[in-house]
Amino acid sequence: MIEVTPLRHRDLAAVAELFNQAHAALPYAWTLDPQSFRDLVLLNDGGPEAILAVSPEGWLVARHGEHTSGFAHCTFGRLTTEPAEQRRGFLRSLFVHPKAPAGTTAALLAAADAYFAAQGLAKVAAFDIGTGYPCYLAGRGVLDSRHMDVMVALGAAGYRISERWQLYECVFSGHQPERHPKVPRLLLKLEEPDPDGFTLEVTNRADPVASLECRFLGAVSAGTGVPTASLRRLTVISEYRRMGVGSWLLLRCLNELSTRGFRRLAVAINHQDEAAQSLMLRMGFDELALSGYSYAR
């Protein structure tokens, strides 16, 4: 019989080990001890891209007899890009033991449904890219497409795929020559809103042209031994596309990171954004052998 209950203290080590097994093949993965799992996963509030509750009632553990066979992390809140009054459920993570009994994933999803219903939440996002952990997929929380058992169970539970993502990275050292776009009067401004990242803004006089946001991945850097950052946003307004503005901004970002001692930049790109994928490949990024999905219901 499969039993699902909120996590107990004595479950922590077994659940942390399951987490390590489930994510061992992902880029930038490293082994978490129980305390690190507690700090980086269970107590993570989703910042800076989400505002999420730390809700122990949603830390759901599946057991079969004396064996811990799976875990689901449920909570509620919103993404920071959403209105303050908007509130929905988030299934941040779900993983099971390779030898878990049939029905373990379905049992965890049923318990997740009960949790969301008790919170009065009708809408749920699963594996939303804005709710990833600091230690997982360079801070992104999408479901690895190799987890077919979880994908099938999500479909049976009424979830639908909302987005598909691909991961790119650039490993670099030292500065690279920058080629300024052949556009007059462009100004570049660096801003550091907090210690964990920076933004680059390009303007033409007072008019916005392009912007970029980069976040420092402290946990990934410490865990993997490679100072790593994540490109969270790169936008160029339509009138200035195909003029080299995006390439210049991205190269300026890489050089800024190099100055600060970083050696790797990771970026997750929606699979429909062909322009961004083309830019990454032109700029020397490698596409990693990983794609992931976000779900909604």
Image (cartoon, helix red, strand yellow):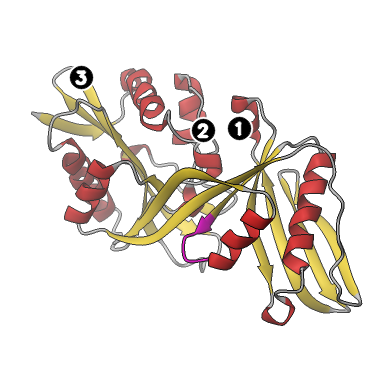
Chain-order first, disc 2 or disc 1: 2
Residue range of the region highlighted in magenta in the rendering? 269-273
Label 2: few (<14), some (14–19) or many (≥20) C-alpha neighbours in 10 Å: some
Residue 155 position in % (x across, y down): 21, 55
At mark 1, the secondary structure is helix
Residue at 85% x, 79% y: name it: 206
Circle nearer the viewer, 2 or 1: 1
Q: Is residue 270 magenta?
A: yes
Task: Tell me how far mark 3 sits from mark 1, CA to CA.
Answer: 30 Å
Chain-order first, disc 3 or disc 1: 3
Q: Quadrant of residue 100?
A: top left
Q: Is residue 183 left or right of residue 232?
A: right
Q: Quadrant of residue 240?
A: bottom right
Task: Tell me how far mark 2 sits from mark 3, CA to CA.
Answer: 24 Å
Q: Is residue 71 visible?
A: yes
Amino acid type, callout 3:
His
Chain-order first, disc 2 or disc 3: 2
Q: Is residue 21 magenta?
A: no
Q: Quadrant of residue 266?
A: top right
Disc ID at residue 219:
1
Residue at 89% x, 79% y: name it: 205
**Among all residues in the image, which is located at the extreme left?**
1
Residue position for label 2: 40
Residue position for label 3: 67
Residue at 64% x, 61% y: name it: 279
